Image (tube, rainbow, N blue to C red):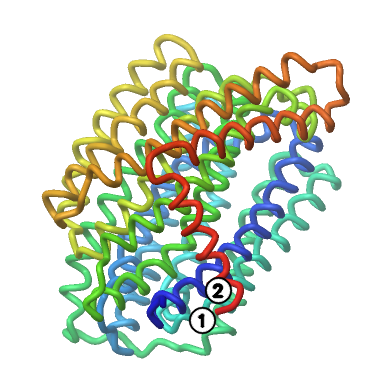
Amino acid sequence: MPSATTARGARGGAVTVTAQLIRVLVQMAGVVVLSRLLTPVDFGLIAMVTVFVAAGELIRDFGMPTAALQARSLDHQQASNVFWINTLLGAIAGLALIGLAPAIAWFYDEPRLGPLAAVMAGTMFLNGLQAQVQVQLARQMRYQALAFTGVLAPTVALAAGVGGALAGWEYWSLVAQIIANSLVLLVSRTVAARWLPALPRRGHGSRRLLHRGTHFGLAQLLTTIASNVDAVVIGARWGANELGFYNRAFQLLTLPVSSLLGPLTQVVVPTLNETAEGGGDVGKLLLRIQSALGAAMCWLFAVSSGTASVLIPLVMGEQWVPSVPLFQILAIGGCFSALSYVSYWAFIVADASRHLLNYNLVTKTVSVALIVGASTLSIDAVAWAYTLSLLASWPVNLLWLKRVAGQDSGAFLRNGFRSVAAAGLGAVAGAWTVKSLDQLHPVALMLVGGLAVTSVFLAVFASSPNGMNVLREAWRGTRLIRHG
């Protein structure tokens, strides 16, 4: 019988995953509709600024929400101090971006970027205000409130973006979408949490939280740099139009990872903490989580990659055909990105923030070097460099965790590569099917290609050592989630 903690975590995971699937559908609808209403240049301009906004968001975050979420106990004054730290950092990051706006426009030789950067800087202040409110909801395990607000915000934001695009705002419609998302999240989660911060006070264990948060923040900053340096070099070398094609492919990669796995952190970390406090086997539970999430995400990337030559032109329009090979390259890295998320949770639960920082210092530096070097060749080479850096980082991640937290890295490697191998063979089968039956209607071709991917994926997965047991356990997990 599952423990009460595991059952509650499973139910919380079910609520979160369901909401995030709805959120992904909303965001995918936005990708489809806005890709047809706007041009690659519009998306390229926003991508140029988004790189700097992402860096500012990490400064605004500084790892404090992660440290607060990970803490075994967090009183009201500690939470309040974290709130004020994030609010101050959000204001500083926003003002810094406004000050850098002219330099950003000069760097890309694109005068339209100055006003864009100045306006988008406001999102960092809004996100700083809501960061600790989100932590409060997560620590109280109020997953339904998190789920509802997580769906409401992108829905309202999509309406703002589409309305702006129809009104002829061009790239400013994407800015409206981004700001609307941050504003709705702040208001809805503040109302849901019914939590107000106290005035800041010295002490109360805040120094320890700040120390841990600094490690998490610097590690996340390195990850963000490695994840955005490709956009910087492509934008600087080839311009907004080519960056627009790459950005669409990259967003199709990151959308399911960030939208599904990112919010699951608010469920997984508290559940693992309670398991550890109750004397449970955190490593075994993490392996089960990797089995389920790794297989699901790898299957998703296999289907989308195997049918990409039909999928992308069908849903986004023929103008986006150049994004197809880029997405197929990046989708390989998507599998390893999803597997690495599980390892990231392990670092958090093991309270190994310094080790996470050291790991990122090594792997992300190599990743940046690979991408910058590849930028001298072609955009495809940049995509391959990003993918290969993710592939190489995951095993290093597991070996690092073996030394830090005593994890069975071999079990995690075997478990993950089973999903990757099944996805790779499935994607090849899907691509071959799509190419062989290209006379079919695009919708029918997508369905047949997806079926081919799924059939091969399940066959390879089930025939691997212990594969059937993993599938049975996943089925039992879905029954647990349904029946609570």
Q: Which mark is residue 394?
A: none
Camera sees residue 116: yes
Residue 404 image offset from top left, x and y in percent: 13, 54
- The extreme top residue here reads 377
Task: Tell me which amino acid carries mark 1.
Answer: Arg
Residue 119 image offset from top left, x and y in percent: 58, 52
Marks 2/1 in contact by CB < 8 Å: the verdict is: yes
User: Number of numbered discs present?
Assistant: 2
- Residue neighbourhood size for the residue with mark 1, other residues' Cα within 10 Å, grouped as few (<14), some (14–19), many (≥20): some
Quadrant, the N terminus: bottom left
Residue occupied by mark 1: 142
Task: Tell me which amino acid carries mark 2.
Answer: Leu
Camera sees residue 53: no
What residue lies at 49% left-to-right and 65% top-to-bottom?
Answer: 127
- The extreme left residue here reads 403
Residue occupied by mark 2: 146
What residue lies at 53% left-to-right and 17% top-to-bottom?
Answer: 238
Q: Secondary structure at mark 1?
A: loop
- Residue neighbourhood size for the residue with mark 2, other residues' Cα within 10 Å, grouped as few (<14), some (14–19), many (≥20): many
Quadrant, the C terminus: bottom right
157 to 187, vertically: above or below? above
Residue 145 image offset from top left, x and y in percent: 58, 78
